[in-house]
Amino acid sequence: MAERPLSNQEVARIFSDIADLLDIKGENRYRIMAYRRAAETIENLGRDLYTYWQEGHLQELPHIGQAIAEKIDEIFRTGRLGYLERLEAEYPRQLIELLRVPDLGPRRVRTLYERLGITTIEELEKAAREGRLRDLPGFGPKVEENILRALETVRRQKDRVLLSVAWEQASALLEALRATAGSALVRAEMAGSLRRRRATIGDIDLLAASPVPEQVIEVFCRLPQVAEVLLAGSTKASVQLHTGQQADLRVVEPRRWGTALQYFTGSKAHNIHLRELALEKGFSLSEYSLKREDGTEILCAEEEEVYQRLGLRWIPPELREDAGEIEAALEDSLPKLVRLEEIRGDLHMHTTWSDGRLSVEQMVQAARAHGYEYIVITDHSPGLGIVGGLDVERLQKQRAEILTVNAKYDDITVLQGAEVEIRADGTLAYPDEVLALLDVVIASLHTGLRQPREQVTKRLLAAIHNPHVHIVGHPTGRLLLRREGADLDMEAILKAAAETGTALEINASPERLDLDPVYVRQALEMGCLLVVNTDAHHADDLDNMRYGVWQARRGWAEAEDILNTRPLEALLAYFRGDGG
Ligand code: DGT
Ligand code: CA
Ligand code: CA
Ligand code: ZN
């Protein structure tokens, strides 16, 4: 008996590692698939696998047959798995890390190991630099070059964190700084990619204004969050937090705050373009000031003044990627970006009816605390990978409960929807007659994300063309810093969504933020409508709405582009097909 039963994630990891190792070994596809499916089932389970094991119900779970049930049994009894240990003796588990390098499939990983004994990224990089990969079977100079480039990307990704993680840390730092620095601090804000609300963040950039910069730097370096001071000067400091994150602080004179905030917000590409524009107008723009050709300085205490001096409207930080925002500001055609306060309801949330943590009523309470006018409860359908989904009978029972809860509160409308699985063969997990009974239908992909482009695109298109489907949930299925989205023909998807009026979701869950802003903008140009949903599994998740709205803004979305900024009647009219 193991000391502590392994978590679902840990057991799922064992089976997905087995699948990866068998893949490297070149085993039969069906066996590999069987382990992958089992891992997916376990990962998405609503209850502890351990409980199923104790109750002797393992084999009732989808994709858990006798062979896998026996392995789970061994894992829970002994804390080990002999089968995996034997596999590892042939192919070290470290090789799985190599599979994540783009351009390296299982066959190439095997070749690397068998021919050159490579097991780590470092060894791979060394061999590639020394030109030892190009002569391996199945490689060649082009592949070697691609691998080197891919390793560069991997390295750049490695030190990034989710926006939500960095944002919470930065908020706490600012709060502590404000509380401790007292009157030495005039103002302080986030800058860099955080202020631009990028989905992932390299380091935290903070800017402060103070007449006594040294004092602010000193206070900052002593904050309880700081583990180590990497660099401290009179106007800037770099520290490492206990979380491992790096944070940079710059302190400027209050009368130079505007130019400094503009500069440190970036992006670099935006700054370069802005500097060129400044030069055309006879100014040189720096973090300190705008300098005229005769060398005299114009100081900008506010960011608006910087843009104004250059003949521009103030540009919201989310747009500052040099993607046409400067041109738009010049001709005064910047979008009127959607704001969090404009969101009237959340159309995607889970309860204990499937894999959520709270009851319908508890989720309703949480939504009322957010001041929402309406919400839609969208639990999972049964289907591949998602266990505990509602069959048609339980869906009816849930409807009764939702109606009862809805009747209890007159300040919010609670609707019944569902997150229906788009199955691997492209059909939906509920028949049309069932879908027709629901107020809002979200169709999502959770499995088969690695299917070839044509196949996975076709599945999504089929869902979009189903007249009962109102929304496509987290369209690509990406998990930031962890898993690429499906290889979709996005152009075809957006075109079909625009034609059928099917809304695309911006899933606000910090690890998804899917659709990506780049596609949001493309979707809007093609005439699609969007929704921003939290996909909440707990009350706290409702706070994630801000991350979704920020990504919508990064995609240039206005309130009218986002369906859940509309009043309930207008929203439902749209979904019924008789509204704008
Ligand atoms: P990150 O940290 O990778 O998520 O991205 P950022 O945008 O926060 O980049 P970071 O921390 O290297 O620099 C913060 C800001 O400082 C950046 O957005 C713009 C400005 N900046 C940094 N280096 C340069 C530069 O070489 N030229 C210009 N014009 N601006 C720069
Ligand atoms: Ca940064
Ligand atoms: Ca920085
Ligand atoms: Zn969901």
Image: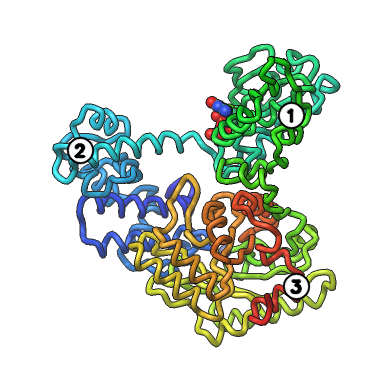
Q: Is residue 361 above or below residue 198?
A: below
Residue found 66% across the figure and 27% down from its top: 225
Query: Residue 316, position in %: x, y?
Result: 69, 43
Question: How far apart are labels 1 and 2 at the CA level?
Answer: 49 Å
Q: Residues within 10 Å of mark 2 (few under 14, many from 20)?
A: some
Q: Is residue 237 above or below residue 384?
A: above
Amino acid type, label 3: Leu
Amino acid type, label 2: Pro
Residue 64: image tag = none
Q: Residues within 10 Å of mark 1 (few under 14, many from 20)?
A: many
Q: Which residue is mark 3?
A: 568
Total number of numbered discs in the rendering: 3
Check contact, mark 3 vs mark 2: CB within 8 A.
no
Q: Is residue 473 above or below residue 151?
A: below
Q: Which residue is mark 1?
A: 258
Query: Residue 576, position in %: x, y?
Result: 65, 81
